[in-house]
Image (spheres, rainbow, N blue to C red):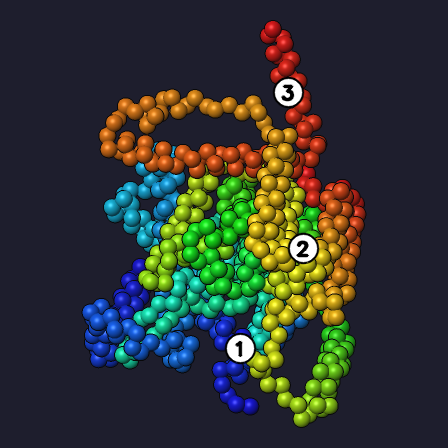
Amino acid sequence: MALEQFAPAGVMIIIATILAFIILVISRIFGPHRPTFRKNAPYESGMKPIGPAQRRVPVRFYLVAVLFIIFDVEVIFFLPWAVAMRDLGVYGLIVMGVFTLMLIVGFIYEWKKGALEWE
Amino acid sequence: MNRNRLIIGAIVLFVVVFAIVALIANIGGIIEWVGGAIDFLLNPQQRIATIIPCSESDGCKLLHPIVFGVVFALVIVTGFAYTTLLERKIIAWLQQRSGPNRVGPFGLMQPAADAVKLIFKEDIMPDRADKWVYLIAPMVKVIPTLIVLAVVPLGPDIIIPWFDGNWYQVPLGLSDVNVGILWILGITSIATYGIVLAGWSSNNKYAMLGAVRSTAQMISYELSLGLTMAVPVMIVSSMSIGDIIDAQAGSPLNWFVFQNPLAAGLLIIALFAEVSRSPFDLPEAEQELTAGFMTEYSGMKFAMFMMAEYLGMIGVAVIASSLFFGGYHLIPVTAAPIMGPLILIGKVVAFLFLFIWVRATLPRIRYDRLMQFGWKVMLPLALLSVAWTSISVVLGDVSGSPVVYGIVSGIFFVVVVAAGFFFLRESGDPTAEIEDDLADDPVVTGERRGLAWIVLNLVGGLIAIPFALVEMLVKSLESVGKTAQPLSDETAIVPVNTEAAATKSGGD
Amino acid sequence: MEFNFITVAFIVFSLITLGGAIGVVTCINLFRGTIWLMVSLFGVAGLMVLLSAEFLAAVQVLVYIGAIAILFTFAVMLTRSITSDKMRFTRVWVNVISAGILFVLFALGVIYPVWVANAATHFPVTDAGLATTTDLGVALVSGSQFVLPFEVAGLLLTAAMIGAIVIARDADDEGN
């Protein structure tokens, strides 16, 4: 069953977490710890920091994320079909072609609309 | 300082005592193991006598992941340390410098020195940072790079003796799950999230900008990655990496790169972007963003980000060689299974050399061109490569003869190459000239005809062909980047040209 | 309930899921809330592995942690002043009561059909009846099963893409 397959990977996750934790703690133990006000201020090329850093990002990045999710879901639909492709033959190819064609139409719209342009 | 020495002393003492106790407790087992190993070497019949597959023994099932995981983690972390050295050495070589050569012979102890230095650096916690997120961000970045290879077999099953006197057949991989491709995609996408966390929690403008940029970059190229990874899945009809590797056994002509070179090339480019290596190292564009998302990190936390980058390089080298370049197959490895990991290491080093070579050669690509290249060139080409393999495989299966597969595949190949030439000729720059700097090069003029000169000439002659090929590839990539340019950019070029023309005519 | 490896794994993953969910609703900072949400979804992926649905588990990690997390993060970063302000709901009791009623309804909806209506049925996980990824691929495309929903999903994705562009471009124009 699936758990037996994934259990070694789970062990690896635990080992990696422990390793990362050790690395994180090791410099806390051995390194000096002498904070000063200026040392702990955000780095802005030596200038005094102006305003908050966590400001709004351009909507463009949000658009990229949305488009990414849509194509990511497409990739996920691709993979089980790719596994079964040789069983399905030409029929499967046509069905998948129709599916992809719809997304390509959307992609062309996106291209023409300029959603892929970066100033 | 005293406290630190005490802690170091305590740790050393603990390790020594633990080792002694472990040695005494297992002395019988060790003698038996040594005896078994000698027996194994001297008496080949013993090998076939009692071999227990690991999956049939409860103890082995429990112990194998732990031992393998720890060994694998240590090996890959050492590999990371020496990858940094390799990178510095090769870049120094390409730039005719010496590189690190002070610590140990040929600078071989340099990574250890770097690690010690970073350990004793101050660990700064910025005042405005979100403390917990700031702490977990390096972990979220580095853990996926360690575990992504858990699904990749690093060699065929090997047979080892164990303390109970039996021989066990253990796989050289952690868990070859049957959704291996999805595991790789999913785990690499978690690493993207680590960058967002780091950038946001640092509360620094450079970090924030760098994080948003590199996230957008990585998710854009992840699409092409996912699509090209589907190509071997289609050929093998399985998502398990072990199946994909085994389908490429035998001669190197069975590698999938020869079935779909387009997909292999796109996969490598997408992997470059995925681990943010040059020329896609936008998050680290130091002229614009200082150090990107890791601006506020110092000490070992900074080292963790570097570790994630180099482990990512090693990881994607293993993934690329497993999916398209035969994994651990080069010569038949069933006779000597231990050759498997060595061959894989050789391929990984070759890929690392490619990574470093590209970094030393290409300038960083501009951000808008990067995004346009990802969406307007990589994504359509990835869809084309999927169409290539799917149509030719299905038609070959339906007709029942590999000839049809070859013909359809060949048609696709010709179409891709012809279209590539057509598009690139349109946008290529024919006025590019070869520089004459080589005329003064001591290597070329041959003033020092020592042994090194002969070796250099031999090596240079041997790698001249790949150089030419790579230059062609680079030229084509540049032209492809230019095709993705919007028209508005050309207006910016036109005045310069007219000005140049004006001065020229004025001179006349 | 026998106490074995699977039970331990189930308890661990359930605790991760529930702990993450509690973190989501108690966190004032929206960004930290998204991190807790990812923890919770990771626990759900673990539960799916326990149910032998490894394809779904991998998709869960790929889509939710890899994509939706980034989308939420960008959305939070896009929202005006919400990352810096400490917003606090003042009408705690209204929220608690409505959340409690919703929880009871959902719990009934899950518990009744599974444990009361089919009390005799157990759900042992066996290898025999398990669907593989190949079965999934065949089912998605095969004419007698899910080919129509599959194509409709493609249409939906296209519609979502166009909608996203329309909304984002409008906002962009306003911004300029």
Quarter in which the C terminus of chain C is drawn: top right
Task: Tell me what residue is drawn at x 74 percent, y 83 percent.
Answer: C109
Give B213 or B330, whichever is nearer the viewer. Answer: B330
- Residue A104: % across, % down: 72, 50
Q: Which residue sits at x=59%, y=85%? A: C124
Comparing labels 3 and 2, the label whose residue is closer to the camera: 2
Q: Which residue is mark 1?
A: A1
Q: In the image, which disc is placed on residue B497?
A: 3
- How crowded pointer 2 is (Cα within 10 Å; few <14, some 14-19, many 20+) is rated as many
Residue B400: x %, y % from top left: 60, 58
Q: Amino acid at mark 3?
A: Asn
> In the image, is residue B34 above or below residue B272?
below
Please tell me which of labels 1 and 2 falls first in the chain.
1
Q: Give me the chain letter of mark 2.
A: A
Q: Is residue B179 above or below residue A98?
A: below
In the image, residue B432 sits, relative to residue C63, either above or below, namely above
Task: Residue C30: give x, y in percent of width and height.
Answer: 66, 62
Crowding at dot 3, Cα within 10 Å, few <14 / some 14-19 / many 20+, comes out as: few
Residue visible at 39% across and 24% down?
B438
Name the image quarter holding residue B100: top left
Q: Which mark is residue B84?
A: none
Question: Which chain does tag 3 point to?
Answer: B
Going by the numbered disc 2, the residue's amino acid type is Phe
Circles 1 and 2 on the same chain: yes
Q: How many marks?
A: 3
Judged from the image, the secondary structure of the residue bearing numbered disc 3 is helix
Q: Are marks 3 and 1 in contact (CB under 8 Å)?
A: no
Q: Secondary structure at mark 1?
A: loop
Q: CA distance from mark 3 to mark 2?
A: 41 Å
Frontmost residue, A82 versus C172 = A82
Mark linked to residue A71: 2
Q: CA distance from mark 3 to mark 1?
A: 68 Å
